[in-house]
C-alpha cells in the first residue's frame, strides 16, 4: 500500500497509535497466560506426568514470549509528518475522471480483451491478428481521447460501425450496458490478472503435467497490448481514480451511468454536483499539469497565444485547490502576477510554490514502512527558491534584496555541491549588476557602493573576462554535466549567457571591440541537440539583439538595419507554428530597426514600425517589451518635433520618458529649455545630473559645449569638449571622436578660424560619413559649406549634399540655413552672383518661415 502514490490518506495511521495497539494486545496476552498458570497451581495436586510436562511447556512459552517482547525494536518517528501538515498531497493525486463514457469504454475494452484472449481458463478460438489489433486500437484510442461526453446512442452507433457483427463484440457490449442500465449489475471496474500476465489459468480438468499448457502460454500472440501503451496508462489512471472513490461517489456514478444508458435525448449526465465539474483540460492532475506547462511555455515565448491573464489566474487557483499535487500552478500564478506588475502577489505565489514542492515522494520503502511517511523533505527549494524570487525583486527594482537572495542561494549550492545552481546564481548576479531593472545600460553597479562583491562565502571568483569563464567552472562542473544531456545543455546555455553578460559589461563601459561578424557577436549559442526547449534560438536572439544595439550605439545605422531585419524575418521563417517569439529580445530587435530608420532620417518608417510594434508588444501582454517601444517612440518623436521647432510636441513626446531613464529625459529636457532661450538653465540641469555611464558623461559634456556655443562662450565650450575627448580616448566607441572634432570645427568656424576648421573637418570626414547620423551629417555639410565660402572656395558641392540629405519639411531650420548660404553665395557681392536665383531663394525661404516660424537652432545639434 505504501508504495502506491494513490493510497488514501485514511489508510495511513501514525506510528505511535500502532505501537500502543500492539503493546495493549501483548499485555492482554501475557496477563491471560499468567492467570492460566495461577489457576493451575491452585488446583488439587492429583496430577501426574502430563501436568508436569504441561507446566514445563507453559513456562518455556512464557519465557520465549518475554524474550520476543524484549527483542522487538521500538519504532520512533524521526521527524514531523509533513504529509499531515500539507494535506497528504501525494495521496490526493487525481487520475482520469470517471464519467459514463469512460465506464462504457472500460467495458468495451474488457469485451475486446475477452474476445481476443478468452475468459479465465476458457481460451479464445480465434485471437485478433496484427491487422485486426490495429483496427481495434484505432477505435479504442479515439474513444479514450474524447474531450467531451457523448450520448449513449452515439456511442452505440460508434461501436456498431466499428465492429458490426464480428464475433459478437457489439452484442456482448450491449449486454453489459443493458445490465447496468436496468440495475441488474453495478459498475465493477476490476481487471483480471490475465490482462497483465497474458497467461491462462490452469484448467482443473486437465492433468498438472500437460505439456501443451506451458507451450501455449508462452505464445506471443496472447499479449493483448504492450504495457507501455497509451491504453495501459489510461487504464491505470481510471483504476487509480476508482480506487479512491467512496461508496457515495460510486453510487452517484452508477446512477449517472444508468440515466446515461436509458436516455436517448442526447443529454449529458455527469456524476457529482454541478459545482464539481471542471473544464476537460484541467479535470485531472495529468491534464492540469500539461495545461500549466503549456501556458508557462507560451507566457515566456508568445503570451498572445496563451489564455488571458485573468483566466489563467482563475484556472490556476482552481488547479491549486483541486489538484494539490500540481505544484506548478503556483509558478504559473507567480509569472502572471509579474506580467500584471503585482510583485507582492508574485512573491507570495512563489513562496507557496516552494512550500508545496519542499518534499518529494519517499522512494525508501524501509523508511516508509517504519515511519509511515509518503514524503520526505527536498533540498531543491533551498537552492533555487532564492534565485527565482531574486528575479522578481530585480524586475521591479529592489536590487539589494535580489543580491542578498542570490548570495544565499550560491552559499547553499556550495554546501550541496550543485554546480548548476551555483553557476545560475552567478549568472543572475551578473544580470543584476549589468542590467538591473533598467531597460537601458546606464551603469547601475556603482549605485550600491555598500555591496561587497568579494564575499568570503563565495569561493568562486568573480568573472571579469570571457577567458575566466572556463577557469572559474573548473572540474566541479564536469560530474553534473555528464549525468544527462539536458544538464549539459543547461550548463552550455548558462555559459553562453554569461559570455553575453560580460560582453554587455564591456559595452556599457565603452571598451568592447566592435566587430560586425555573425560568428563573433551571434555565435554565442549553446550546443543543443534537437533544441526541444529552443535554447539555441533564444541564444541566437540574444546575440542579434546585443549586436544591433551595439551597432546603434556606435553609429552604424545601415549595418544595424540589415542585422535587425534579418533577425525579425528569421523569426517567422524558422518557426512554422503561429507561436513565433514575441519576447523582450525580439522587441529590442524591432526597436533597433526603428532606431536605424531614424538614424538614416526615415522618421515616418520608424514611427510606423513602432506603431505596429505597440500592438504586438502591448502593455497588457508584456510590460517588459512595451517599455522598449515606449522609450523608442518618445526619443524618435522628440527628434522629429525638435527639428520642426515644435517644442510643445517635444514636451509631450518625453512626458513618459522620465520613469524609464533619467539621463535620456534630462538631456532632451535641457535641449527644449535651451531652444526656448534659457541656455543657462539647461546647463545647470545637465551639470546637476549624476551619471556613471561613460557614454552618458560624454554626451553631457558635448551637450553643455553646444549650449556654451550658443551663448558665445567659446572657451568654456572648448573645455567641455576637451573633457569629452579625454573620456572618449579610453573607449572603443566609433562615432564619438568624430562628433567631438566636428563640434570643435563648428566653434572655429563661428570664430572665423576657417582654415583650422577645414583641417578638423577634413580629419573627421570619413568617420562622419561612416558612423554619423542623419543630423550629424547635415550639420557637417553646412559647416563645411560655410567654412569653404569664408575662405573663397566653392561650397556648392557641400550645399548640394546637405540639400539632398534634408527632405522637404523634415528639418525647416536646416532648410532655411541652406537657403541662407545659397543666397550669400549668389548675392551681388558673392562668389557666383545671380539675381534670379536669389529671388527664388527668398521666395522659398519665405514659404518655409511662414509654415515653420522660429529661431534657427542648428548649433544645439
Image (cartoon, grey):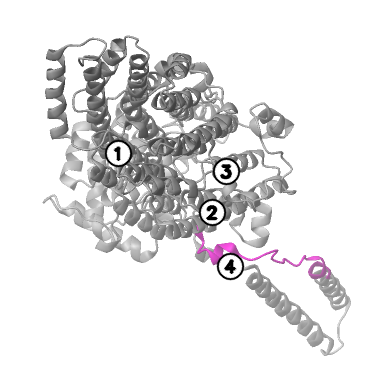
Question: Is the Cβ of the residue at disc 3 closer than 8 Å to that at disc 2?
Answer: no
Q: Is residue 812 left or right of residue 25?
A: left
**SS at badge 2:** loop
Q: Which of the 4 image quarters holds residue 345?
A: bottom left
Q: Mark 1 points at which residue?
A: 638
Is residue 538 magenta-colored? no
Q: Which of the 4 image quarters holds residue 358?
A: bottom right
Task: Point out the frontmost of discs 1 and 2.
Answer: 1
**Which of 656/154 is in front?**
656
Q: Which of marks 3 and 1 is nearer the N terminus?
A: 3
**SS at badge 3:** helix
Q: Which of the 4 image quarters holds residue 74?
A: bottom right
| Distance of label 4 from label 2 (alpha carbons) | 23 Å
Q: Name the residue under label 4.
A: 13
Q: Is residue 375 left or right of residue 103?
A: right
Residue 503 in view here: no
> What span is colored magenta in the figure?
67-89
Q: Determine the residue located farthest toward the front in the rendered image.
A: 829
Task: Point out the frontmost of discs 3 and 2.
Answer: 3
Residue 111, percent from left and from top? 32, 40
| Distance of label 3 from label 2 (alpha carbons) | 30 Å
| Distance of label 1 from label 2 (alpha carbons) | 50 Å
Q: Earlier in the sequence, mark 3 or mark 4?
A: 4
**Looking at the rendered structure, which numbered label has been put on residue 357?**
2
Residue 60, percent from left and from top? 86, 71
| Distance of label 3 from label 1 (alpha carbons) | 30 Å
Is residue 83 magenta-colored? yes
Q: Mark 3 points at which residue?
A: 433
Amino acid at each position: 500500500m505504501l508504495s502506491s502514490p494513490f493510497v488514501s490518506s485514511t489508510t495511513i495511521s501514525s506510528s505511535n497509535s500502532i505501537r500502543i495497539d500492539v503493546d495493549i494486545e501483548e499485555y492482554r496476552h501475557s496477563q491471560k497466560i499468567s492467570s492460566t498458570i495461577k489457576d493451575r497451581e491452585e488446583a488439587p495436586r492429583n496430577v501426574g506426568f502430563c501436568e508436569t510436562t504441561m507446566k514445563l511447556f507453559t513456562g518455556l512459552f512464557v519465557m520465549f514470549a518475554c524474550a520476543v517482547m524484549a527483542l522487538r525494536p521500538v519504532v520512533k518517528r524521526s521527524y514531523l509528518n509533513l504529509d499531515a501538515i500539507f494535506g497528504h498531497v501525494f495521496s490526493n493525486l487525481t487520475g482520469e475522471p470517471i464519467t459514463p463514457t469512460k465506464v462504457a469504454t472500460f467495458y468495451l475494452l474488457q469485451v475486446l480483451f475477452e474476445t481476443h484472449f478468452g475468459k479465465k481458463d476458457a481460451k479464445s478460438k480465434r485471437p485478433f491478428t496484427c491487422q485486426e489489433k490495429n483496427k481495434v486500437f484505432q477505435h479504442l484510442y479515439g474513444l479514450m481521447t474524447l474531450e467531451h461526453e457523448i450520448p449513449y446512442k452515439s456511442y452505440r452507433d460508434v461501436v456498431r460501425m466499428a465492429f458490426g457483427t464480428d464475433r459478437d463484440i457489439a452484442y456482448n457490449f450491449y449486454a453489459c450496458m443493458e445490465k447496468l442500465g436496468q440495475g441488474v449489475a453495478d459498475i465493477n471496474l476490476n481487471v483480471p490478472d490475465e490482462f497483465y500476465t497474458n497467461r491462462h489459468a490452469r484448467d482443473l480438468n486437465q492433468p498438472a503435467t500437460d505439456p501443451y499448457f506451458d507451450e501455449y502460454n508462452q505464445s506471443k500472440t496472447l499479449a493483448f497490448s504492450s504495457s507501455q501503451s497509451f491504453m495501459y496508462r489510461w487504464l491505470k489512471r481510471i483504476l487509480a481514480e476508482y480506487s479512491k472513490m467512496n461508496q457515495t461517489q460510486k453510487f452517484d456514478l452508477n446512477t449517472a451511468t444508468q440515466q446515461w444508458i436509458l436516455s436517448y435525448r442526447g443529454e449529458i449526465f455527469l456524476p457529482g454536483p454541478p459545482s464539481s465539474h471542471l473544464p476537460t483540460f484541467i479535470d485531472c492532475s495529468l491534464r492540469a499539469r500539461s495545461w500549466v506547462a503549456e501556458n508557462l511555455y507560451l507566457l515566456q515565448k508568445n503570451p498572445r497565444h496563451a489564455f488571458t491573464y485573468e483566466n489563467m489566474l482563475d484556472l490556476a487557483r482552481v488547479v491549486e485547490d483541486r489538484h494539490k499535487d500540481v505544484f506548478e500552478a503556483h509558478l504559473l500564478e507567480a509569472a502572471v502576477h509579474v506580467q500584471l506588475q503585482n510583485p507582492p502577489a508574485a512573491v507570495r505565489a512563489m513562496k507557496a510554490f516552494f512550500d508545496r514542492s519542499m518534499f518529494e515522494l519517499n522512494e525508501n520503502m524501509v523508511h516508509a514502512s517504519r515511519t509511515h511517511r509518503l514524503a520526505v523533505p527536498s533540498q531543491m527549494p533551498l537552492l533555487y527558491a532564492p534565485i527565482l524570487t531574486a528575479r522578481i525583486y530585480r524586475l521591479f527594482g529592489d536590487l539589494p534584496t535580489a543580491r542578498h537572495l542570490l548570495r544565499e542561494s550560491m552559499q547553499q549550492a556550495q554546501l550541496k555541491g550543485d554546480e548548476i545552481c551555483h553557476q545560475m546564481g552567478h549568472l543572475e548576479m551578473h544580470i543584476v549588476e549589468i542590467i538591473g531593472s533598467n531597460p537601458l545600460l546606464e551603469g547601475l553597479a556603482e549605485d550600491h557602493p555598500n555591496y561587497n562583491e568579494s564575499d568570503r562565502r563565495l569561493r568562486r571568483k568573480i568573472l571579469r573576462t570571457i577567458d575566466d569563464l572556463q577557469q572559474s567552472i573548473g572540474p566541479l562542473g564536469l560530474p553534473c554535466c555528464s549525468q544527462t544531456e539536458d544538464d549539459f545543455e543547461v550548463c552550455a546555455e548558462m555559459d553562453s549567457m554569461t559570455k553575453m553578460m560580460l560582453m554587455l559589461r564591456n559595452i556599457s563601459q565603452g571598451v568592447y571591440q566592435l566587430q560586425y561578424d555573425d560568428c563573433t557577436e551571434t555565435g554565442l549559442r549553446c550546443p543543443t541537440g534537437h533544441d526541444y526547449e529552443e535554447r539555441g534560438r533564444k541564444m541566437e536572439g540574444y546575440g542579434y539583439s546585443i549586436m544591433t544595439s551595439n551597432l546603434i550605439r556606435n553609429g552604424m545605422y545601415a549595418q544595424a538595419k540589415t542585422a535587425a531585419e534579418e533577425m525579425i524575418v528569421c523569426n517567422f521563417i524558422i518557426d512554422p507554428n503561429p507561436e513565433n517569439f514575441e519576447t523582450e529580445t525580439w522587441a529590442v530587435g524591432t526597436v533597433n530597426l526603428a532606431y536605424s530608420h531614424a538614424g538614416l532620417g526615415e522618421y515616418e518608417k520608424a514611427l510606423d514600425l513602432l506603431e505596429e510594434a505597440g500592438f504586438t508588444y502591448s502593455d497588457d501582454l508584456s510590460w517588459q517589451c512595451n517599455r522598449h517601444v515606449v522609450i523608442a517612440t518618445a526619443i524618435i518623436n522628440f527628434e522629429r518635433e525638435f527639428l520642426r521647432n515644435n517644442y510643445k510636441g517635444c514636451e509631450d513626446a518625453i512626458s513618459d520618458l522620465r520613469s524609464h531613464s533619467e539621463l535620456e529625459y534630462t538631456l532632451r529636457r535641457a535641449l527644449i529649455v535651451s531652444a526656448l532661450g534659457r541656455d543657462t538653465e539647461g546647463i545647470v540641469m545637465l551639470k546637476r545630473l549624476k551619471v556613471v555611464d561613460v557614454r552618458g558623461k560624454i554626451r553631457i559634456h558635448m551637450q553643455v559645449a553646444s549650449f556654451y556655443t550658443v551663448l558665445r562662450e567659446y572657451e568654456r565650450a572648448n573645455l567641455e569638449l576637451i573633457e569629452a575627448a579625454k573620456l572618449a580616448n579610453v573607449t572603443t566607441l566609433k562615432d564619438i571622436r568624430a562628433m567631438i572634432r566636428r563640434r570643435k570645427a563648428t566653434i572655429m568656424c563661428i570664430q572665423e578660424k576657417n582654415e583650422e576648421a577645414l583641417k578638423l573637418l577634413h580629419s573627421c570626414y570619413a568617420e562622419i560619413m561612416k558612423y554619423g547620423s542623419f543630423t550629424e551629417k547635415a550639420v557637417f555639410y553646412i559647416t563645411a559649406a560655410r567654412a569653404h565660402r569664408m575662405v573663397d572656395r566653392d561650397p556648392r558641392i557641400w550645399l548640394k549634399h546637405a540639400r539632398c540629405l534634408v527632405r522637404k519639411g523634415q528639418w525647416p531650420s536646416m532648410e532655411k540655413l541652406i537657403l541662407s548660404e545659397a543666397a550669400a553665395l549668389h548675392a551681388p557681392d558673392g562668389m557666383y552672383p545671380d539675381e534670379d536665383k536669389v529671388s527664388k531663394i527668398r521666395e522659398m525661404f519665405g514659404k518655409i518661415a511662414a509654415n515653420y516660424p522660429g529661431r534657427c537652432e542648428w548649433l544645439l545639434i
